[in-house]
Amino acid sequence: MCIVGGVDRVWNVGKRSRWPGSMTPRSTVMQVTKRIEFCAGHRLPGHEGKCRNFHGHNYRADITLQGDEGGLDSVGRLVDFGTIKNKIKGWIDHHWDHGMILSTDDEKARAMGFERVFWMNGAPTAERMAIRLVDEVVALFPDFNVHVTIWETPNAAATASRVRPSV
Ligand SMILES: [Zn+2]
């Protein structure tokens, strides 16, 4: 009994010091993530190493929608995973999958005459791809905070987030 009471007291002290004056219940933040895989080629002009050469990746895009517990539907879902897949995979398939993703200022790429190219402003890094895709996701799911992570390799990713202004 004494040990349990001591732990409880320490936890309460820590809680008060971290959120002074906040005794109101907090809502539970929910996130759902759908992973979409695709293949594409690119190159990064100006890169100091081998990434300046044309090459490809098996990319993964993690699409995360964030809301709160009160936003669950009658089934208990924030958003159906299939809905995320249907809306976003179509965009990725149409624009990025099995194509080249290249910079509009890349003269060498322009000279190659690739048939299927998605042109971007600036070098097509994972960061810029995440920013580009987060724009699409926000347009399709305007009621959620959106996080998009582009995995260029299993060990390297960039995340772009668009959070709704708090009311
Ligand atoms: Zn690359």
Image (tube, rainbow, N blue to C red):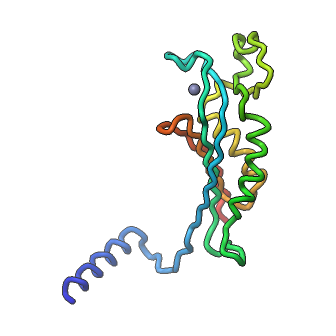
Residue 97 appears in the figure: yes
Instruction: Depth check: give the residue in front, 36 or 150.
Output: 36
- Name the image quarter holding residue 158: top right
The residue drawn where x is 72% and y is 35% is 97
The residue drawn where x is 72% and y is 49% is 137
- Name the image quarter holding residue 107: top right
Instruction: Depth check: give the residue in front, 35 or 111.
Output: 35
Question: Relative to 18, is 25 on the left or the right?
Answer: right
Please determine whether, in this image, residue 89 is positioned above or below residue 125: below
Residue 123, given in percent of the width and then of the height, sits at: 64, 24
**Which quadrant of the render holds ligand 1?**
top right
Please determine whether, in this image, residue 87 is positioned above or below residue 167: above
Residue 138, given in percent of the width and then of the height, sits at: 73, 51
Residue 37, given in percent of the width and then of the height, sits at: 64, 42
The residue drawn where x is 60% and y is 21% is 55
Please determine whether, in this image, residue 145 is positioned above or below residue 4: above
Question: Relative to 18, is 138 on the left or the right?
Answer: right
- Name the image quarter holding residue 91: top right
Q: Residue furthest bottom?
A: 1
Instruction: Depth check: give the residue in front, 110 or 122.
Output: 110
Residue 34, given in percent of the width and then of the height, sits at: 63, 54
